Image (cartoon, coloured by chain):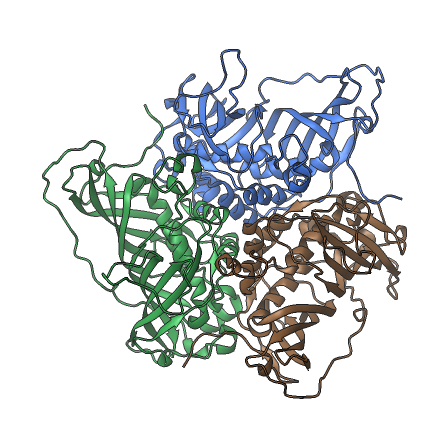
Chain colours: A green, B blue, C brown
Amino acid sequence: MKKTSAGNFFEDFALGHIIHHATPRTVTAGDVALYQSLYGPRFAIQSSDQFARALGFERAPVDDLIAFHIVFGKTVPDISLNAIANLGYADCRFQTRVYPGDTLTARSEVIGLRETSSGKSGVVWVKTVGINQRAETVVSYVRWVMVRKRAAAVSRRPPVVPDLPDIAGDIHVPEGLDFSRWNFDLAGSPHRWGEYRAGERIDHMDGITIEEAEHMMATRLWQNTARVHFDQHAAEKSRFHRRLIYGGHIISLARAISFNGLANAGMIAAVNGGSHSNPTFAGDTIYAWSEVLARIEIPGRMDVGALRLRTVAAKDCPCADFPLRDGDGKYDPAIVLDLDYTVLVPR
Amino acid sequence: MKKTSAGNFFEDFALGHIIHHATPRTVTAGDVALYQSLYGPRFAIQSSDQFARALGFERAPVDDLIAFHIVFGKTVPDISLNAIANLGYADCRFQTRVYPGDTLTARSEVIGLRETSSGKSGVVWVKTVGINQRAETVVSYVRWVMVRKRAAAVSRRPPVVPDLPDIAGDIHVPEGLDFSRWNFDLAGSPHRWGEYRAGERIDHMDGITIEEAEHMMATRLWQNTARVHFDQHAAEKSRFHRRLIYGGHIISLARAISFNGLANAGMIAAVNGGSHSNPTFAGDTIYAWSEVLARIEIPGRMDVGALRLRTVAAKDCPCADFPLRDGDGKYDPAIVLDLDYTVLVPR
Amino acid sequence: MKKTSAGNFFEDFALGHIIHHATPRTVTAGDVALYQSLYGPRFAIQSSDQFARALGFERAPVDDLIAFHIVFGKTVPDISLNAIANLGYADCRFQTRVYPGDTLTARSEVIGLRETSSGKSGVVWVKTVGINQRAETVVSYVRWVMVRKRAAAVSRRPPVVPDLPDIAGDIHVPEGLDFSRWNFDLAGSPHRWGEYRAGERIDHMDGITIEEAEHMMATRLWQNTARVHFDQHAAEKSRFHRRLIYGGHIISLARAISFNGLANAGMIAAVNGGSHSNPTFAGDTIYAWSEVLARIEIPGRMDVGALRLRTVAAKDCPCADFPLRDGDGKYDPAIVLDLDYTVLVPR
């Protein structure tokens, strides 16, 4: 009996099927230091136990994106090893903060299936849930990918396409937090929630060049096994002749770069959607800009509000003039990420 | 008096001499995260405190190879700084698991010496023992290296060559472990000990390309000071014109790659022998395959058995057809590791 | 209102002004492991909890330079984002050891200002203090940098230039330490304080080549945001066409390399001054040598003494003949660091 897995093909997915993903993962201070060293974030909540405790956390939680990357990584061997394209995310909600010592596992439910007309592949929608050792949901999201069929054939199964929200569900502020104790000096910016307005655009200025060692170290840290990130020997025969960088690497870089302008946006409440509009490779220099899409009041809270943001990352293209789309409405070839997400900011 | 050490030469080793190696090393969660990020292992025991505790561990032990690399690294300044070649290992046994917080030291006894006929060098056999802060043996092994003489001369000392076992001694299952509580879903494979048979071969499929920054970060993490790994300026005048990659780096990569096919082989009990048959350099892509050499019952245990494995790593050469030797019985030039070791697998 | 900061210009600094730098930082075992992996130090105090406890530490403190780099990194966005040149350090004293779990913050006082005759820039002197969560001073130092003006203009303000000591103030031995319990075998060298003599020079022998990924990972770990280290796209249009390596990266490399010859110099008491005499780039191989400038008794201590050292780092230039200056007294182009500092050594 064959002991290795070549991953699931489109035919292997059944609606309603729940997949328990392998390799539970205890998060540690080592992961936090590596995240710091690979991306360079400066948000105070995740950087300082003292700062976090002053707000009501038990200590500094790990970056929200660490939880996302770990949960996402677990799904790769089952969901996307045979993916042709990662098509999108939706309704990603960070529900419980993760501290060093917590152990994460993940499971996914197949919630949509649609064959492509060619008969060679199909789109699979999964709802993935990451849980901690107390069975609390840490993060949940929907993702859809185009997956190869094992054998080309048209089955004429009726497509099932889930209804997905444009904006993630309820904004969750963890219990027991009081943002009125926010220290703006230590956080690095005086700008409160009320000072941001819809339509405002911010050039985050800094550029960071990516090296092969960095994106591979990051992607292995998340136990993500997608081959396109690691195997140059195979990549040489591929379309790009290069290892592709994990899209989440760009999200984390853009988020770290966004500190200059969004220093008080220390927590991500949700990711509403995102597009990896062009691939990135080692040697690319990533810049970013953001637009405030909406300022959202949180019911019952005068200490904290939410901002819905778009953060756009561009390669080899400083963002002083906010590049996005060309005249035909297509993404500019420099644009590598267009992320729609919601952050918490002290009022 | 000269304060620096240029390492020991063949003349400096005396039979029965015990060398206490420098720099005790406390292992931490930081080492575990770096190991994760440099190699990408997914074995559940070392990844999850919860999974490990369910089996009877106090928490997730560190990867067995972390202990090996740290102990090996300590020996380099005393044993192999003037080595011409690392000739072999034998009888390597993992006897006590290492947890973050443990402090490792190492000592070596010279157990064999044989001059080469040229009079320019000699072979030194050492038995190395790594111990923890409770003076428990963590790992022990025999290693032999060809070491330069300070001055060419034939001393006609009779050679002393130790008798070494083909297979490492008793297989040690740590006390208090119960593998009947193994969670096959979380571990990532349904295949029990009894499903593997001698002669079975497994292509582990994945390839990982090595970068200079990665192998140097790993080798420094182990406080291994062998100059050939770090100094490109000197390497340019050497035979290969490149920095050589520490052989243990390839062992760890091959072990991580072997997860696909050996996901339940979560613990290494012993290394019986190994050959670094060709050098590796940054830019090489490592693939691996394994052969089951033997299925071994462990006396008194119905919950766990051992598999003696050969894992072979090849550079720039996918392993679907199990490359190993050419027609003359020599290693194929792509083969960079041929490791004979014993793992524990739930029954 | 503009939310991003482009850093302070010369006009923004006022004598006596105190700047509270952003982003408090909790130091962890993850930082220690990354430091180990990026530089390869082997000093026993920082490597082993057991070794450190035997001397009276509560456990292994983190490397003194970790504290320096973190504190320095915090000052960059406020002090040197618009620096043309880092001109010097003085009177850097390590006053309280840092353990994993400690949280560091930093503040700087402007203690000197002098416009350059061109009217385009000025020199700013700051005294920076890093403190821990108990408000104890961890490290303090004076640094001066040449900073661009926002607009060229000569203001004819009288220059204020602080009086700085050639050698840092009182040597501080942390309370409760007893160096008579030093284990020379474990530390890796038999050489006591009394065996070093002023004028003695030591070639540290080893060379380490630097990779882009390494210096960027280090510099991000310290939350240092100076753009010249990270942005290859912008660097291509700059004078060197390359990313510049953070000077502190070279200090840490030279310090790690100096172990071979200075294994018992396990603690830095002070940095008296230093010069980054030439820039370094990825691909450079760093070598180092040291000279004993003075042997200093510590009042009331028979267990420990101090050595004032010069450690010189050279790129692509082994240091057997102690390179430093050319015939005109200028630094040899290979010299990248000339550091004057004081270490503690058991007597």
Q: Is residue B228 left or right of residue C308?
A: left
Q: Is residue A302 above or below residue B49?
A: below
Q: Is residue C226 above or below residue C260?
A: below
Quarter of image, res C238: bottom right
Q: Is residue C46 left or right of residue C216?
A: right
Residue A147 visible in rendering? yes
Q: Position of residue C139 (x, y in %)?
A: 69, 68
Residue B59 visible in rendering? no
Residue located 33% across and 70% down the image: A291
Q: Is residue A208 left or right of residue A342?
A: right
Q: Is residue B182 left or right of residue C260?
A: left
Most foreground residue, B26 or C116: C116
Q: Is residue B343 above or below residue A315?
A: above
Q: Position of residue A335 (x, y in %)?
A: 34, 58
Q: Position of residue A190 (x, y in %)?
A: 46, 79
Q: Total number of numbered labels? A: 0
Quarter of image, res A178: bottom left
The quarter in which the C terminus of chain B is drawn is top left
